[in-house]
Image (tube, rainbow, N blue to C red):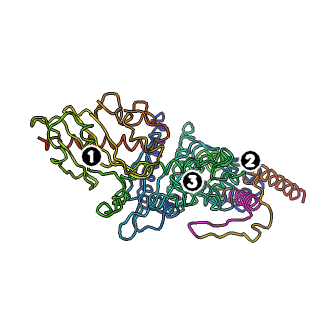
Amino acid sequence: MKAAMPIIVLTVIAAVAAAILSLVSTGTAAAREAADRNFKLASLDEVLPEYANEPDMETIEAETIGGKRVLLYPARGPEGEYVGVAVELNTMPAYGGVIGMLVGVDAERRVNGFKILPGHKETPGLGTKVMEEGWKSQFYGQSLVDARGTWKVRKDDPAGMIDEVTGATITSRAVTATVEEALMVIESSIASIPGAVPEPPPEQEGQAEEPSEFSAEGFRHESLEHVLPAFDNHPDKNALEVELEDGKAAILYPARFENELVGVAVEIDTPPGYVGSLNIIVGVDLERRVTGVRVFPGHEETPGSGDLVEDVKWLDTFKGKTLGEEGKVWKCRGDDPDGIVDEITGATITCRAVVEGVGFALEVIEKNWDRLN
Amino acid sequence: MSLGKEFTKGIFTENPVLVFLLGLCPVLAVSTSAFNGLGMGVSATFVLLGSNVVVSLLAPIIPRNVRIPCYITVIATFVTVVDLVLHAYAFQLWMNLGLFIPLIVVNCIILGRAEAFASKRGVLDSIVDALGMGLGFTLVLFVLGAIREFFGNGTITIYQMGDTIVQFSALEGKFAKTILMILPPGAFITLGILTALNNILQEKLGKA
């Protein structure tokens, strides 16, 4: 008995301690959750335009270019309309390690605010100056498109738009790069936020497009010949409209030769590129291998870089690829060494949109295959 | 020793920080503002009070060879309670103190008092001892935090929770902030000066 005393006493003390802690833990659980949530909402208030919804209740997962998972917090006005979005992500290591940040943009994807989250180890009085409103305001109103190529601190690049905090260049650099990265994450996943991409205005019926020689009909007719295996029917007359999960529509063009199905093309919008989404047409054969891709002109990608994706040579690199290709991921090689195609230098964001768009098109074909026969 | 003396020894003659230089890690790390110092001091005092009471009660039945694990379990329980409660009801302070709340578990002042005092004395003595030691610890942290915050940031924050801030900021901006005071060297320098002042005081009192 004497020998067992230490075991008994220690066990009893541990059991009583566990009982007390489970009581306290249960008792404070609601309050702790509320405190965490209050803090999150207060942080979102700081970085987002005025909103009326509960952004933390409708978060959306997204991925950074490096493949890290981040959360998007969409903000909506009283009518449920989209007013902006915030993204929570970490910087690259700054002076004292990574810094958690919350970056918010308005509906036009301009920086509305950002917040350095607690838990960073930057030097008080030096690195922490990046939390001061005066410094932060340099970013406000900037967007990826407007400030293209100038997301740098001036010390690194005279063309940079951000004055670094004296004595805290490393911290300034990390924060600057992260705000840009946040915008890129938002740019590439904006389509996944319901209501964030405005419906295109019904301009087609007016004169707006008339003066230009470009005719969508003509381009479509011609593209179908290029992207499909040989056919003798009129795919564009047998078009089949399908509704997608996000409410938008895609159009399927079945191609037949002597009344036998030989392939199908789908016309679809890509996720947003650098400026907006692109309209593409993707053809496949019976094995669902890509037989051709065309990008409709009339998008707003930057002339000389983004519009390089219209290059047929680049588009032909999709030929023969399938959705479930072994050892490949449906991404640009710059984003993933196992990516499906190389991107065009200087047009990474647009290429990424096209690659995703083609992948998306293949999924639509797969899902609707049975309706074609 | 009278109860009064048991109480005051923690503040002056046996001040855990200024005389024994114990628990310096939290002392140096969280004393960047008066309020943080105060929060840390009060949290540690609560844990010290709880552990002293429980240890003095349990000491007779705890076998000698497992006494340290027993004390640590008791201390860790109180620390976790403090951590949970601060998280729930004093979020801002909890954020500021961060890891230093859980680290109270290994603060040698607490285990030291359990081992050197509470395990050998009655409950009443142990309570008074804990209050004295806790107050001594809190006082040093508060003064240290106030001095560092004043020179480093120009303010002295007594209370800050949500939007409610009670602080002395009359002189803010009237002199250049000395960032060094917020940095670790400022903590060492200030602590050194406070220790020296306490030594002088002790000497004077000793002679009188």
The residue under the point 65% across, 45% down is A157
Residue at mark 1: A220
Mark 3 vs mark 2: give the one in front: 3
Q: Is residue B157 above or below residue A314?
A: below
Viewer can see residue B8: no
User: Which quarter shows the N terminus of chain B?
Assistant: bottom right
Query: How far from the left and from the top, in percent, is residue A128?
Result: 65, 54
Residue at mark 2: B21
Mark 3 vs mark 1: give the one in front: 1
Chain under label 2?
A: B
Chain under label 3?
A: A
Q: Considering the whole magenta stretch, tell me its main secondary structure.
A: helix
Q: Tag 1, which secondary structure?
A: helix
The residue segment tinted magenta is B134-163
Residue B113 is covered by the magenta coloring: no
Q: Which amino acid type is marked by label 3?
A: Pro
Q: Which amino acid type is marked by label 1?
A: Arg
User: Which quarter shows the C terminus of chain B?
Assistant: bottom right
Chain under label 1?
A: A
Instruction: Say whether residue A44 is left or right of residue B47.
Output: left
Residue B137 is covered by the magenta coloring: yes
The residue under the point 60% across, 56% down is B96
